[in-house]
């Protein structure tokens, strides 16, 4: 098992990994969760999959086990910025506006984490290992990008997993039901050390 951070600068070096990650997102968010999201050729994508973003994939033998997208909070493409901020601004119908207690930040040292998933077919005996690898690579990549904080919209119980890896993960908004999934925005500090 390995974790790879993809960018528009390096996806050509990793064969089908980027497309396979978008296919795994399709299976997770469209097929399993029944979310109404953009798709093409069995791949899920949205307006935040731009050259400004980075994608972390945990994979083994070409199969994507888990993934997450990182987007700078300073990103801007047309009317869109980043998912959490755009939801708060009322630009996204599927995510409530009241997902944060404070105004969504815009700062070069804060990145957003979104589209977090672990593939449904990952066996329970290795699921925790896959999750820990995903979090560890996300933290390494965010730090390399100059982030001191990551703002994420994650499943309700994920903060406990983050604490098990040694990172600070604090709620930044209320627990919400989004398309049948209980989720919460969190602030993740990049200052603590991973175990």
Image: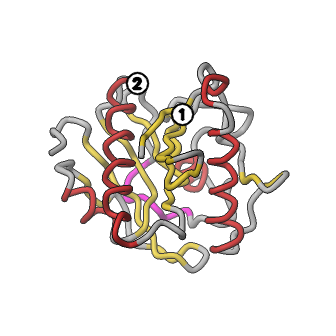
- SS for dot 1: strand
The residue pinned by badge 1 equals 54
Q: Which mark is residue 96?
A: none
Residue located at (39% from left, 48% from top): 134
* Image coordinates for residue 105, horizontal then vertical, percent: 43, 40
Quarter of the figure with the C terminus = top left
Q: Are marks 2 and 1 in contact (CB under 8 Å)?
A: yes
Q: Describe the colour scheme in one phrase.
A: secondary structure
| Residue sitting at x 36%, y 57% | 131
Q: Residue furthest right?
A: 41
Apparent side of residue 12 relative to residue 191 in the rendered image (left or right) = right
Q: Position of residue 148 (x, y in %)?
A: 29, 32
Dividing the picture into quadrants, the one containing residue 12 is top right
Q: Quadrant of residue 82?
A: top right
Disc 2 element: loop
Q: Counting residues from the N terminus, which is met first, the one under dot 2 or under dot 1? A: 1
Would you place residue 3 above or below residue 32 in this image? above
Task: Name the side, left or right, on which 28 lies relative to 106.
Answer: right
- Mark 2 surroundings within 10 Å by alpha-carbon count, few (fewer than 14), some (14 through 19), many (20 or more): some
Q: CA distance from mark 2 to mark 1?
A: 10 Å
Residue 42 placed where, x, y %? 79, 56
- Residue 17 position, x and y percent, is 62, 39
Tell which residue pokes out farthest to the top in this image. 9
The range drawn in magenta is 97-103
Prevailing secondary structure of the magenta residues: loop
Residue 98 belongs to the span the image colors magenta: yes
Judge by depth and name the residue closer to the eye, 186 or 2: 2
Q: Nearer the viewer, residue 49 or 93?
A: 49
Q: Residue at x 20, y 50 (%)?
A: 168
Q: Is residue 25 left or right of residue 124?
A: right
The residue where tag 2 is placed is: 145
């Amino acid at each position: 098992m390995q974790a790879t951070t993809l960018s528009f600068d390096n996806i050509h070096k990793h064969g089908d990994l980027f497309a396979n990650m978008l296919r795994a997102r399709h299976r997770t968010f469209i097929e399993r969760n029944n979310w109404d999201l953009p798709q093409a050729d069995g791949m899920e994508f949205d307006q935040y999959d731009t050259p400004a973003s980075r994608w972390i994939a945990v994979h083994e033998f070409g199969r994507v086990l888990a993934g997450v997208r990182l987007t700078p909070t300073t990103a801007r493409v047309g009317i869109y910025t980043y998912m959490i901020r755009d939801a708060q601004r009322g630009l996204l119908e599927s995510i409530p506006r009241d997902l944060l207690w404070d105004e969504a930040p815009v700062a070069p040292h804060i990145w957003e984490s979104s589209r977090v998933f672990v593939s449904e077919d990952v066996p329970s005996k290795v699921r925790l290992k896959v999750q820990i690898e995903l979090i560890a690579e996300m933290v390494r990549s965010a730090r390399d990008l100059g982030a001191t904080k990551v703002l994420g919209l994650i499943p309700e119980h994920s903060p406990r997993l983050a604490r098990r890896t040694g990172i600070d993960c604090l709620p930044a908004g209320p627990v919400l039901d989004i398309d049948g999934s209980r989720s919460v925005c969190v602030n993740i500090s990049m200052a603590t050390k991973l175990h």
